[in-house]
Image (cartoon, helix red, strand yellow):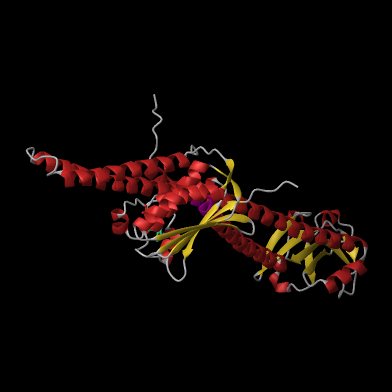
Amino acid sequence: MKKNKIKSAYWYQENLKKYRLGFLTYNLVIFSIVFILFSVALIFLAEERFFNSVHSDIIEIERSIDENSEILYSILEDDPRVSIVYYYANPKVGSIDSLINPKVTDFLIVGNIMREDITPIENIASEIDGVFRREKIRNHEYISFTTKTWKIMEIEGETQPSFVVRVKIYMNIDGELVAQDELKTTLMISTLIIILLGCTSSFLIMKRSMRPLKDFVEKQISFVSDASHELRTPLAIVQSKIENILANPTQNVYDVSEDLAISLKEISRLNKLTQELLTLARSDQNRLTYNFEKVNLNIVLNEIVEPFIEIASFEERTLEYKGEDIEAYVDKDKFRELIIILLDNALKYTNPNDTIIVTLKHGVFDVEIEVADTGIGISDETKKRIFERFYREDKTRSRETGGNGLGLSIAKTIVTDMKGKIFVDHNHPKGTVFTISLPKIKEKR
Ligand code: ADP
């Protein structure tokens, strides 16, 4: 039985490229076939039209030869494409044979074709009439047509009426052929352009539509490698500390207290990291649950900030809260988690004597919560990437303060799930300001 193997993110990354190439080739082939068929059909139709119109012109001339010589003369005068060759014979009076099978004695050309360019018909019986034929005379292309005429005719330039046995019409088609060639070239160029445009546009559309998938796969790969890297460091520290302790089993707890304290710190770091990873994994699977309720944000924020004021003053920072009574729909626990992430960071990335101000106020269209500090601030590069998973501007400082670079990604996830937005900017004259914008409660009228 074929096993349904779960594919890795690397598999998707590799196969995305192949899939894209396959899709492009497929598009190129389909586009080419469709447009080539279309062009061939168009050329075929145009050719039909050209020749149909030439044939009907010739038939028109044939009719005027039979019926109306005035029309014929005007055609000959107006249309330089037409040449007419009259073959005539002088049958012996009374000879039936000469009437049935007359010998061509001479011919006359009216039109642009020169006499020396014509191979005269010798045997009238062998000349098939009523058929359109392509002929080349001195690098010019013609369609010729031999009529069935048998009659005594007055021919221009001849003094005596002659017994005309055949009339051959030549229609020059150089113009048509040039037009046809031009059409073919234009069609070929436009087919090429359309194929190129089609492929470029399908490439761009596909690249755009695959972008989210590509980003997701890339993020997944770097997430897994970053996560394992982050887990490895504390585990390695704990392992080495325990090995230290075991190397001297006679030591008492006091002697190994430093190793134990470091191990404990790393374990609590691991604990925090796995908790954060779990939150993000749940959010990726849309499994984070929210209990939205209408709350007075002023009261909730006061409760959250209160204990931090003491911590801040202990760490020689000033923390202030300014708020007005504003209600919003939030999940209280998640909201608390969000504010704690920002306050934690504000304390981590400030120095003694710095100030942190938390503000709750009405925006024009939203409710705004600001956490502004006068701390170390952020670079423009960090500003762009600060909400990415595992992103840390200064990894050593972050490690010292126990940061994993996941706090702000979780903050963003929570804000987005609460239909809000979170921004970061430089605080003036120094420091950083985070602004959370939450939707206002719509008042019923
Ligand atoms: P960490 O757990 O490392 O603090 P976060 O996702 O919370 O991870 O923050 C990501 C990075 O953003 C930090 O490593 C730090 O470089 C920067 N950062 C976050 N908050 C602040 C702040 N208030 N001031 C300056 N830099 C900050």
Vertical position of residue 235 compared to residue 32: above or below? above
Which residue ends up furthest to the top in the rendered image? 1
Position of residue 189 measured from the top left corner of the image (x, y, whole percent): 60, 63
Name which residue lies at 60% across and 53% down: 36
The magenta segment is 205-214
- Which residue occupies the foreground of this view, 117 or 413? 413
Position of residue 404 measured from the top left corner of the image (x, y, whole percent): 34, 50
Q: Residue 62: in sight, yes or no?
A: yes
Name which residue lies at 80% across and 67% down: 84
Left or right for 150, reference 217:
right
Which quarter of the picture shows residue 182?
A: bottom right
- Which residue occupies the foreground of this view, 304 or 342? 304
Vertical position of residue 145 compared to residue 292: above or below? below
Q: Main secondary structure of the magenta part?
A: helix
Q: Residue 370: in sight, yes or no?
A: no
Vertical position of residue 182 compared to residue 222: above or below? below
Position of residue 193 measured from the top left corner of the image (x, y, whole percent): 59, 62
Name which residue lies at 40% across and 66% down: 379
